[in-house]
Amino acid sequence: MGTPSPELVRVADKAAMARAAADLLLARIAANSGRIAICLTGGSSPKQLYELLATDAYRDRIPWPRVHWFIGDERFVPPGDPLHNMTMARSAFLDACAPPANIHPIPTDTTDPEDAARAYERELKTFYGAEQLDAARPLFELVLLGIGPDGHVASLFPGFPAADVRDRWVVGVDQAHVAPFVPRVSLTLPVLASCRTVLFEVGGADKRPILTRVLAGEDLPANRARSDHQTILLIDAAASPETSADQSTSGLPQALIIMGVAGSGKSTIGKALGERLGWRFEDGDSFHPPANVAKMSAGHPLTDEDRWPWLRAIAAEIARCRANGEHIIIACSALKKAYRDILLDHHHDVRIVYLEGSRELIGDRMVHRKGHFMPTGLLDSQFATLEPPGACEHPLTVSVDAPVEAIVDGILQQLHVSQDRA
Ligand SMILES: O=C(O)[C@H](O)[C@@H](O)[C@H](O)[C@H](O)COP(=O)(O)O
């Protein structure tokens, strides 16, 4: 299988970009319960993100002891210098939040950048526990990158030999192609690729010229830095070239997740929608691992720990469908945002359909529909758990207070599917 194409995610401005990047970082951390490595970037683009991570809203949600912080490139200046990349990250958030042993700067107190590169390569290999990268076991969970005005990433400049190095993990770069003109030390492209997600932050009007070239597919380091698994380009309105204004919203989604509390009609609506679109429908419950099925059959409620593998199994099925170009509709209560984050996995072609209804309405429907009574406690607890999807999740919201066909019409309308096409 080739390298997946990058996904474009558009946000309004740099503040929204920082929030989206922070949310993705949290999702990546939540998806792996082991020791995690994150590769930070220098430059000015990530500063807002770093500052956001130090705020209560994010800081308290990061399991700091198990997260390790590396850097994709360093300017060969002493720590503390205003140009020093890791110093910027340290003062923005790391020093206040991360255990010192989990901060892995590139040394710049060595004789030259080449020595520093060798020392950092050793450190990365020791952390990884092997001399060779294995595509099935990425080194990093997330690699953050910015794009320079000439299309460079980390300190891999276009036309410089460092951008072609494949047999080293880290290289010394004697001179930079753009300011600041100090020697650099940089991770190489195969090492940056060894991650679950490469996330580019590209914001501000000054990025528009280079982004236009990148989106046109020019052969630049920015177009060669791709994760083996997932690459996301977060771009804001100011950086976005007009010509690509509707690229990310055109076409139908690849997958739809029908969410809502028990009794909101997820399966009925999902099946009816599947028939109208000609897409496969699956009940999310069929993805529960046997341990969960056993627990539920014994009448024990599931905990979030039980739910993660189940949600990841659904996400894996969505990923499989996306890779094969198949459409799928999955019914899954997905009451909390953390659950939906796993299911959506930041894919803009996976959309949520939220079946909205009040507790009274859904309680009533339960009684009248099948003459079957749902215990009040269960419905109450569903509503207590429910975190309705926010605008940033771009849900298709429909009221369940209508006949099935009208609800399906409402969803098709929001998908801009003409009734002929359906
Ligand atoms: O050390 C560096 O300069 C970098 O890591 C570099 O690759 C940076 O990410 C880009 O040049 C974008 O820089 P800005 O974010 O400042 O535009």
Image (tube, rainbow, N blue to C red):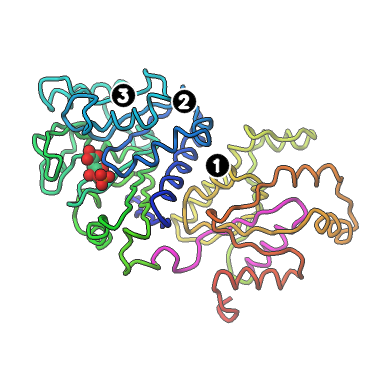
* Residue 38 appears in the figure: yes
Mark 3 lies on residue: 104
Residue type, label 2:
Trp
Report the side of 96 relative to 124 (left or right). Answer: right
Mark 1 lies on residue: 312
**Mark 1 and mark 2 residues within 8 Å of each other at the beta carbon:** no
282, 13: nearer the viewer: 13
Tell me what residue is drawn at x 71 percent, y 64 percent. Answer: 399
Residue type, label 3:
His
Identify the secondary structure beneath mark 3. loop
Report the side of 401 relative to 190 (left or right). Answer: right
Q: Which residues are magenta?
A: 247-275
Mark 2 lies on residue: 64
Given this view, does label 3 or label 1 mark the residue nearer the observer?
A: 3
Mark 2 Cα-neighbour bin, 10 Å: few <14, some 14–19, many ≥20: some
Distance between mark 3 and mark 2 Cα atoms: 14 Å
- Which badge, 1 or 2, comes first in the chain's sequence? 2
**Mark 3 and mark 2 residues within 8 Å of each other at the beta carbon:** no
Residue type, label 1:
Arg
* Residue 189 appears in the figure: no
- Which badge, 3 or 1, comes first in the chain's sequence? 3
Q: Position of residue 258 (x, y in %)?
A: 64, 57
- Which badge, 3 or 2, comes first in the chain's sequence? 2
Q: Position of residue 291 (x, y in %)?
A: 67, 33
- Give yes or no for residue 377 being in the magenta stretch: no
- Classify the position of ligand 1 by quadrant: top left, top right, bottom left or bottom right: top left
Identify the secondary structure beneath mark 2. helix
